[in-house]
Amino acid sequence: MTAPPLARWLGEFRGQLAESALLRIGLMAIIGIVWVYALLIVSDRVGADGAQLEALNAQLSRLRPLAGDREWARRAADADQQLKAMQAMVWVENDMGLAEAAFQDWVRGTAGRAGLGVRQLNVARVATPGASAPASGQPQLIRARLVAEVDHQALLGFLSEVARNQPAVVVERLLLRAAAQPPTAEIDLRILARDRRGAGR
């Protein structure tokens, strides 16, 4: 009895995958691109985190005096829920130096648990060109660049942890260098962080 065409094709594909390192790397690259695309869709929702957070803070302040009115009370409750959801996405530490260190530790620890071989990790706060120094408690952008040896299972595990993490971590860029020996991935990540003095506002 001959195998169905799909089963035959899957068997042939598995054989080709076992024999060809280039095919495995290509498949890993495709899977990585699909994951990055999914993560970019998620990142669009948090792209304007800082501005939205401040807008919700201002909205909540305006609505509080009208709390006696039922409609306004409902709106105030909705705004408060949105504000809390946004605040849950922001990393909060005693100061921004600790926020950078905590983010670096998180990236290194998560990559290690996923099995990624970290070759380089740089973390830095991003200053907005031409802007004055942010006030205490204002969200600030922190970016990390991770260069790691590529193992497709480990990379997918790492990206999955990034997507699930709260407070939010966003993948800005993923570059696979399949021709390098060993193959490497460059991953740019970002978070919004604030010092604890502004966390309760």
Image (cartoon, grey):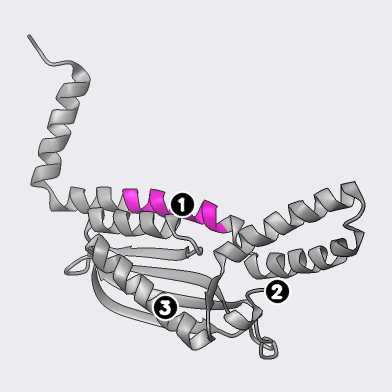
> Mark number for residue 201?
2
User: Can you identify the residue that label 3 sits on?
Assistant: 102
Judging depth in this view, the residue of 177 and 111 nearest the camera is: 111
Q: How crowded is mark 2: few (under 14 residues within 10 Å), some or many (20 or more)?
A: few
Judging depth in this view, the residue of 39 and 52 nearest the camera is: 52
Residue at left offset 45%, top offset 69%: 189
Q: Residues within 10 Å of mark 1 (few under 14, many from 20)?
A: some
Residue at left offset 53%, top offset 52%: 41
User: Can you identify the residue that label 1 sits on?
Assistant: 37
Q: From which residue to which does the magenta span run?
A: 31-43
Q: Distance between the residues labelled 2 and 1?
A: 34 Å
Q: How far apart are marks 1 and 3 (CA)?
A: 26 Å
Eyeballing the image, is 164 above or below 88? Answer: above
Q: Which amino acid does label 1 sit on?
A: Tyr
Residue at left offset 69%, top offset 55%: 81
- Confirm whether the magenta stretch covers residue 35: yes
Dividing the picture into quadrants, the one containing residue 107 is bottom left
| In this rendering, the label closer to the viewer, 1 or 3 | 3
Q: Which amino acid does label 3 sit on?
A: Ala
Residue 159 screen position, x and y as percent: 37, 57
- Confirm whether the magenta stretch covers residue 180: no
Eyeballing the image, is 44 above or below 70? Answer: below
